[in-house]
Image (spheres, rainbow, N blue to C red):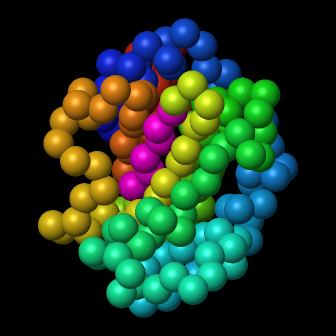
Amino acid sequence: MILNESMSDLIRNGVNFDRPISTEISGILFDGFLIKDGCYFFSRLLEKVVGVKLEDFQDRTGYECFVNSFHVEDYDDIDPVSQAIIFIAKVFEVWCGNYYSIDLRAIMSCDDLSVVVKFHVDREAEEWLAGSLEDYIDPVLSVDSSENIVALLKKYYD
């Protein structure tokens, strides 16, 4: 897991790791994944994307990040940062039970108005984030499915 100082400050100022996941957000996960064009998509999010295809993107990572992206506050505006972290943990739990040999990456970013979560399969020579996370002004976090995000964050911020 890597995160920039802005994200570290945000998490240090309070995340409720024990809050139950919102029913609306959990629906994204419980509808499952679809594999299309060698990409892994949340089926609920793929349904919302019309007229977009792999050829529209530089690579599969870009395609997955476009489709597998949502604003957490659209589903739960009470505590979107906590909900995003809990959702990532739940996704990884399901992912590791079904696709363990393939690493999934979650990227969480925040600004004054929104918390955005994106997911993509970890592929050699394909990256969504550029350079150092400290180059980003807004809080940014990247974590892989081989890591326990809640345990890691609790270790450093509880």
On screen, residue 124 above or below 11? below
On screen, residue 81 above or below 39? above
- Residue at image location 59% in from the left, 61% down from the top: 94
Task: Write down the region rendered in magenta.
Answer: 105-110
Can see residue 96?
no
Could you tell me what secondary structure mostly forms the magenta stretch? Answer: strand
Q: Quadrant of residue 73?
A: top right
Can see residue 117?
yes
Nearer to me, 41 or 55? 55
On screen, residue 69 above or below 22? below
87 displayed left or right of 102: right
**Image location (x, y in percent) of residue 125:** 15, 67
Q: What quarter of the picture does the N terminus occupy? A: top left
On screen, residue 6 above or below 99? above
- Residue at image location 28% in from the left, 49% down from the top: 129
- Residue at image location 60% in from the left, 13% down from the top: 14
- Residue lying farthest right? 23
Question: Is 144 a magenta residue?
Answer: no
How many marks on residues? 0
**Image location (x, y in percent) of residue 27:** 78, 60
Q: Quadrant of residue 97?
A: bottom right
- Residue at image location 55% in from the left, 9% down from the top: 13
**Image location (x, y in percent) of residue 23:** 84, 49
23 displayed left or right of 80: right
Nearer to me, 137 or 143? 137
**Image location (x, y in percent) of residue 52:** 51, 82
